Amino acid sequence: MLKRLRLDRQEWKCEITSILILGFAVFILICLASYSPNDPSWNTVTTAGKQISNFGGRLGAKLADLLIQPFGLASVVIPLYLLGVFLAMMTTKKSPPWSSYPGALLLLLSTSIWASLIKPSLAYHQHMIKTGGVFGDLMSQFFLSYLNMVGTCLIMLIIFSLAIIVTTHISPFKLVTIIVEGFLQAIMTLSRSTLMLVKFMGNIFGKKKDTDEKKKSRAKKPLIKVEKQAKNKGIKDEILQQEVLPFFHESGKVSLPRVSILNDPPADKKVSHDKKSLFMSSQILEKKLLDYGVEGEVTEVIPGPVVTMFEFKPAAGTKLSKIASLADDLALALSALSVRIVAPIPGKSVVGIEIPNLERENVYFKELITSAAFQDTKSPLPLALGKDISGSPFVADLTKMPHLLIAGSTGSGKSVAINSMICSILFKAPPEQVRFILVDPKMLELSVYDNIPNLLLPVVTNPKRAAAALRWAVDEMERRYTLMSESGTRNINSYNRLARKNARQHDKEDGLQTEILPYIVIVIDELADLMMIAAKEVEESITRLAQMARAAGIHLILATQRPSVDVITGLIKANFPARISFRVSSKIDSRTILDSLGAEHLLGNGDMLFLQPGSGTSNFTRLHGAFLSDKEIRQITNFLKKQGQPLYDDDLLKKQEEELSKSRKERGKSSYSNGNEDEGDEDYDELYDQAVAFVSEVKTASASLIQRKFRIGYNRAARIIETMEREGIIGPAEGSKPRKVLVGKL
């Protein structure tokens, strides 16, 4: 403890010097503050024994008179400079550079002249003193006689600025810029607070704006005119008021959920954007970029529900990489949670800078379901993802993706988005058109959908059952391709059209197909749990489905909160061109899911980047996911459960039970194996020979080494190691050390 408190020689000198400087500065300041012209000095003769009013005594009175007579009130610069030196030495533990001393002298002289120019004399203790002292009075008269007041002020402003730069090494121009920016930010904050207060008072006294006018003006006004997305004006009010969505209503078996069971968004939820505040924000952004050496101008501002995009056109010769690297610096300078830079915006010669709004507007699921984008879609698998940065509803088509990969850290809004996707399909298509296989290893997120008529089997929570369900999906895909090949059709839509035509004609002869094939959507809420237990089986099934299942009408939605390369392998990622990333914790995770940076700058709570298939790895759509409460999900599922009991697929359930019993038998054999020749043949592993060749080459063996090399589970790798030990290929275990290899290279 004492060693940490001790100072080295340099710090010891600096501490002593700084304390002496502080004492001298305080003494001079006290002497100047208590100065009286009546006190004895070299310029004043007093009688002996007269009381001295200066707090510094006789020495203080003479010192104060020595400073005030030549420099006047500008003498206060001396103690202030010494206080600055004290603070600098205590902070840096170094003496100030010698160049600051001439600067301090120049600052004292220029301040003296300024004081004489502003007010030549001042009453002080019933005496008139010269504010700039003798020096300031003489020099001001000299300058005024040759330059007049305007010229003198200009010269003194230049000298004063040079004095500040030399003394403090601080640019006065940057200081003024910071003060102006702070003033502008204060005005912006005050204006926003005023608007919020006016809005609050309006709500209290019933002076709300007409909500219909708000809906008509849903697209935001940009600073420079923004091209808004085209709206379908043919939609009538009765579409928004209807209770059942008009898609496959003719089925008559299961009614679609009613829109009325969803919560209405608050009437005053919309956040207003003031054009003046947007203009000031763009000016501040331009100045901040200029501070980092990036010249240009903001050409357009697009305010949205969560973020505002500023379209910035850089000056000629500016490298985009320089702008793209300033995201964290701009977030710090603008006091923003995060800043995302799109460099450049596809199809435009500008850079997009997305800055979070001070007040966030919530997006509600009912807004998306009743929107024109959702109503007009003809797809049986629409996904109401949220709103884009301009506030327009965004609906994607799963049949065109044809599979979706989702990643995001805990609490980023991933589970809410999955629920929104499932409910979007439930609102659009009945069970005879779309069936679900829901896999929820966490046993929390998707259990609410159990026993709805849209399921092919109960919600899967066991990883072994999930692997069996995926293998069944592969078999079902192959069966469907056989049916389509026999009927001469190319995809599920053309096959179903032919089947309906055959059913209408009641012509079942000659092997004509009349079976209607529903779409199958497989949703896996946490892929990482499956990959930990049955990585090889799950990866093979997912890869085959992703490569071939589109035409068969089988689609995958995979989600994980751990987007690492051992979960999202190269095979899986290569077959999932459509991806969604919510906020992730690092740039590495962003690159893993999107092959690009940007997801680490998202805001959470449903803020996402959507990579559409065929759009390239840098053309992302930023969306703000809709909020769907647990109560609304229960209301939707309860409505569907009342329609009837689910019709589970018997073949799928049977396959799951067979897989589970097979897995139990294999574990039993492994547990009770006694190592004789017969059981050794029965438990023979197909990777055993490759593993023996590998350990004989590397001359070391361990279960973890085999596991990493052949990408298998730990139990399987341990069984291979035990077999090698029984056959004398490797030696016994020696604690945590790798086993010795007893054979030569094979």
Image: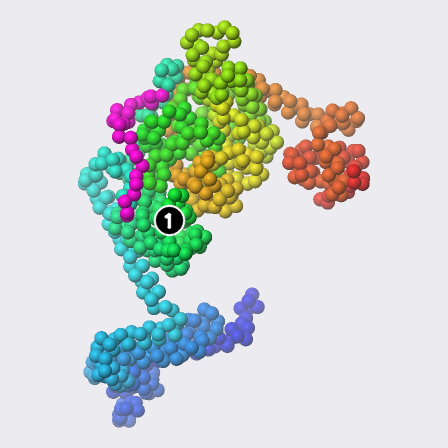
Part of the protein shown in magenta: 223-247
| Scheme by which the image is coloured | rainbow
Which residue: 65% across, 24% down? Answer: 664
Residue 61 visible in this rendered orientation of the protein:
no
Foreground residue, 480 or 505? 505
In the image: residue 738, left or right of residue 376: right
Is residue 410 or residue 155 the one in the foreground?
Answer: 155
Q: Which residue is drawn at 56% across and 30% down?
A: 543
In this rendering, would 661 be left or right of 581?
Answer: right
For image coordinates 19% across by 40% down, the residue present is 207
Q: What secondary structure prevails in the magenta region?
A: loop
Q: Quadrant of residue 598?
A: top left
Image location of residue 363, percent across then percent down: 34, 36
State whether residue 664 is above or below residue 296. above
Look at the image and say whether residue 278 sits in the magenta stretch: no
Residue 33 in percent (x, y) is at 29, 78
